[in-house]
Amino acid sequence: MKVKVTSKKGLKISLSVLVDKKTIQIKLDEKLNELKDKVHLKGFRPGKVPPKVIKDQFGKAIYGEVVDNILKETSTKAIEDNKLRVAGQPKINLKTFGEGKNLDYTIEVETLPEVKLKPLDNIKVTDYEISVDENTIKKRIDEIAKSQQNFLEKSGDEKAKKGDMVVFDYTAKIDGKSFEGGEGKNLQIVLGRDLFIKGFDNQLIGVKKNENKIIKVKLPQNYPKKELANKMTEFYCKIGNLKKPVDTNVDDNFAKKIGAKDLKDLKDLIKKQISNEYKRSLDSITKKNILDQIEKSHSLDLPTNLVDQETNVVSQNLKNQDKDKNKENNKKIAKSRIKIGIILNQIAEKNNIKVNDEEIKIEIQKQIKNMPGQEKMVMEYYQKNPSAATSLKGALYEEKIIDLLKRKSKLTKKSVTLKEAEEIIKKFTETNEESKKPIKKSKK
C-alpha cells in the first residue's frame, strides 16, 4: 500500500492510496478458499467445490466484498499512519478498480484543529453556597404538616364550615333522570378546596349530620361523557359525617412518621432539600460561566461537517420557516457547542480523564436508589437502551472535566440567601433567553 498526502487546506486533507493488484489477488484467493468449505452447489460434495467454480458463480459479489474490506482496512491504516484526528466520516473516491487492476482511490477528511490550551488558573469561578433561614425551613415543615392534616369527628348538632371534611353519598340527575356514573358512596370533600365540581363545596357549608341536601351545579366541560358536559345537574346528597381539622403537632413523633429520626433531623433534611433545589440551578450557571470563559479564551478553526451536523441537531424540532428565521443563530449555537466540545476533550486527554464501566454502574445504582419501587424499570431501561448508557457516560465525562476546571481555577465561594439565589437565576435566565433570539438584520 502506498499513501501520499495530495492536498492540505486548513482542516481539509486529501490522501491518495494505491493498493497493488497482487495484494488484492491474495485477498481474493483467501476468500475463495474460505468459501469452498461453506458453499453448497449441485453436483459437488460439501467442501469440495473448486475455487474456480465458486468464482464463476459468485465472482462479482466476492470481489465487491473483498474490495470493501480492503478499503476499510487500508483507509483506517492510512489515517492512523498519518496521525490524523478525523472529524466525522471520511469520504472515499474510487479512481481505478476492477479484477486484475490496482486499487487506486482518494480519501478526503476534515481533521480536528490543534488546540493550544490556555492556563486553567485564569478561569474565574464563583461557587455558590445556599443560606437557608429558620423561617423558610419552618414554613416548609408547616406545609408538610398541613398536607398530613388530621380530622376529628364533629358533634351531631355542629354545622359544616370551610375547612371541614364532609362525608356523603349522592345520586345525580339531569332533567329528573339518572345517568350512568351519577352515583357515589362515602365521598369525602374538604370544604373550600373546590376539588370536586366547581361551586359544589360552598353549597355544603352549613349542613349537619344525616341531613339531606340538593346541590345544583353544572357538570364540567371536560366531563367524560361529552353529551352531559355543561349540563345543569341536581345532586341528591345524604350527609353521613362531618369532621373538623385538627392541628398537627410538629414534634419528634411527626418527624418519625414522615421518615426522619427526630424533629432536628427533619429540619436538617428540609434545609438540605431546599438548598439542593437552588444549588442545582446555581451550579448550572457556574458551569455555563466556566464554558463561556473556555470558549472566549481559545481561537479555533472548526470542521465544517461537524458544524453542519450540529446545526441540523439544533434546528431539528423547528418548522421550516423558523429554521430560516433562526438560521444564523442556530449556526452560532452549533459552532459554540462544537468548539467547547473540542476544547473539553483536549483538556480531558491532557489530564487523562476517563469514565470506566464501573463508574457508570455506580451512577445507575444511585438513580435506582432515588426511585424506590421502580428499580426494575430503571435497570431494564438501561439494558434495553444502550444509547442511554452512552449518554450517561458522556454526562459523567463532562462532570469530571468541570470538576477539574473548578479545582484548577480561581475559585471564590459565595454564600447567598434564597432571595439572592432567585435573583441570580432570574437574571441568568433572562440573559440566556435574550441570546437565543434571532439576530435582527439592519436595514440598509
Image (cartoon, rainbow, N blue to C red):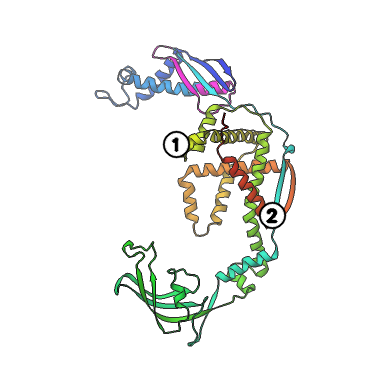
Instruction: Please name the residue that numbered disc 1 is placed on.
Output: 320
The residue carrying pointer 1 sits among few (fewer than 14), some (14 to 19) or many (20 or more) residues within 10 Å by Cα, namely few
* Residue type, label 1: Asn
Residue numbers of the magenta segment = 75-101
From the viewer's side, name the closer residue of 280 and 65.
280
Using the rendered view, name the quadrant where residue 26 is placed: top left
Disc 2 is placed on an element classified as helix
Disc 1 is placed on an element classified as helix
Instruction: Please name the residue that numbered disc 2 is placed on.
Output: 420
Residue 241 is situated, as x and y percent measured from the top left of the image, at 45, 81
Using the rendered view, name the quadrant where residue 29 is placed: top left
From the viewer's side, name the closer residue of 187 and 396.
187
Q: Residue furthest bottom?
A: 157
| Residue 376 is at least partly visible in this image | yes
Residue 437 is situated, as x and y percent measured from the top left of the image, at 56, 40
| Quadrant the C terminus occupies | top right
Identify the residue at horizontal 64%, vertical 68% (top origin). Answer: 261
Image height check: is 430 above or below 347?
below
Q: Residue furthest front?
A: 444
| Residue 32 is at least partly visible in this image | no
